[in-house]
Amino acid sequence: MTWLAWRLQRTETIVAGGVLVLMAALLVPTGISMSEAYHTDGLGSCLAPNPGFSCVQKIGAFQSHYQALNFVTNWFTLIPGVLGVLLAAPFILDLEHRTYRLAWTQSITRRHWVAVKLGLAVLAAVGASAVLIALITWWRTPLTDIGGRLDTGTYDTTGSVAIGYTLFALGLAAALGAMWRRSAVSLTVAFVGYFAIRIVDDYWLRNRLASPLHATWSGARLPAYLEKANILSQTVTVNGRVIESGSSGGVLGAHSQLAVPGSRHALVHAVYQPASSFWTLQIRETLLFTAAAAACLVFAAVWTQRRVT
Amino acid sequence: MANAAVRTEALGKRYGSAWALSDCTLEIPADSITALVGPNGAGKTTLLHLVIGLMRQTTGSVEVLGHSPYAKAAEVLPRLGFVAQDHPLYRNLTVTETLELGRRLNPGWDAPYARERVGRLGLDGKRKVGKLSGGQQAQVALTLALAKRPQLLVLDEPVASLDPLARREFLSAVLEAVAEGDVTVILSSHIVSELERVCDHLVALTESHTRLAGPIDQILAGHRVLIGPRTGATAAARMHDVIRESHTERQTTLLVRADGHVYDTCWQQHEVDLEEIVLAYMGYAPGAAMPLPVPEAVAR
């Protein structure tokens, strides 16, 4: 059965590999040039506390130079969805073309069929997303050294969450496909659903996975421990008057200044997720998405065994 | 009957609120080649899908080669060959890959036989199955079912989608394969004449119910058409076991069950072909009013 499942999943796996090769074609040359620029400019030594003015300038120049590229790679957060949905296709196609009736009337049970079919898709999904993560993590190294890993674009594609995302997209597509047995509509709806859930995840769910910390300081200069942290909200008071309230500061890189009016006398209170929470958040979120994926896959398996005839 | 390959008891299957098959009781004798005939919608495909364990019954029971096919799929499947109506195959696999599928998914796979059969059909192993003609696809599907060396071969409307030549070739292939070993075959069709040539048993199904079942030669021997002067329905029924009657102003035509001779000189006797008998039972039978006419000798 593994042979058959692999044979029927070969095309999709090759396409998934093609997507990764395409990404590599974009990321490897730019990654090498970025890394060279980082070392040539000596930015590594600039990250030490209290650097000179030229260092702050150099970092700013480096960041703005790669801003456009960085922005493009933020969209790579959709690739786990593409990979997951793509790898669910062989399972749904077998149901849509009603060829499962051929497999189920050989000498294997349908339970076996479902397990191998979905199991192989899961393996391919984990493999593809691991390669994706490795590639992007390597590419981003200079940028994360400066800006940390908590900004959404970086967080979504490094660490381990992308594996959970891919599995979730795969599971969602498989569950819908088991019910509808129409590949085009199942894959489309699954991708849209994946996207919607990822938006909820990025803007709402993630910051609730670990309780944030509070900090108060005065002046525009960001305290060192808040560099690379994700500032969820900040309130600025000058002489007892609140002049800015609740706005999100986002993730600020090394040696950042806050654009605070009346900055020298300002008192800033911030709620933030420290840079050190990265792995706590990653692992919790990965587990959450993997559990949702598992639930979807179990649903797809049970539905297929019970309801498909 | 001691030896039934398939036995169903009050078998029923419901989809939502509609019953596709209900209260179906029948037996398929072992080593027979049984034609399962009935009009479209009689529940033939549903019955066959229950027999091969592709789905679970709502009510009643079904036993195939001594096991429940759905619950004991692992026991039954290796001994079962099935070709569905549209003979599903993976269109992107080549012929050789399709045989490889059979080898890998079946412990009892007869690889030399499968290769030899495909060779005899003149099929190029490197061709994609999707590029083959309908008749060739049916033959590949049949090869897949036969090379399992099944004890029970189930063919659901196997020739419905084939042209006359491919039909003949397909049925010949079935006969040839069956001649080699002890295989029970069930072929379904809504056209009786198509199966008469290859089958030795018949089960006629209308609205889930067995209208007629038995060895074909006995069925043929046991029915006659009588033509005589116009007679009232009740008068005729007193004399004969009437399956169907039709009247013109001057004469009455009866299709009757007659195990012996009809000693009634006012009737002209004619032999009758199988299709006409089956149609009489299915289409014109006065439904529930008629006792289920199952000849005793269902076994061989």
Image (tube, rainbow, N blue to C red):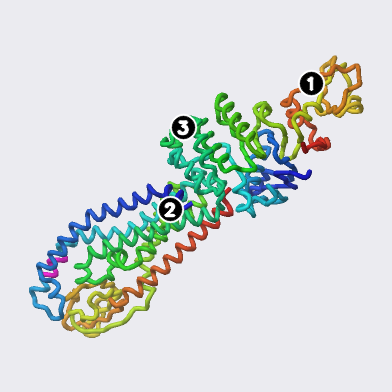
Residue A236 shows in the view = yes
Percent of width and height locating residue A291:
45, 66
Tell me the subunit letter for badge 2: A
Contact (Cβ within 8 Å) of mark 1 with mark 2: no
Percent of width and height locating residue A19:
30, 52
The magenta span reads: A58-63
Query: Which residue matches tag 1?
Result: B271
Percent of width and height locating residue A214:
31, 82
Q: Secondary structure at mark 1?
A: loop
Q: Which mark is residue B123?
A: 3
Tell me the subunit letter for badge 3: B
Query: Which residue matches tag 2?
Result: A88
Residue at horizontal 43 percent and vertical 56 percent from the top:
A120
Q: Is residue A198 magenta?
A: no
Residue B293 shows in the view = no
> Chief secondary structure of the magenta span?
helix
Contact (Cβ within 8 Å) of mark 2 with mark 3: no
**First in residue order: circle 1 vs circle 3:** 3
Q: Amino acid at mark 1?
A: Glu
Q: Secondary structure at mark 2?
A: helix
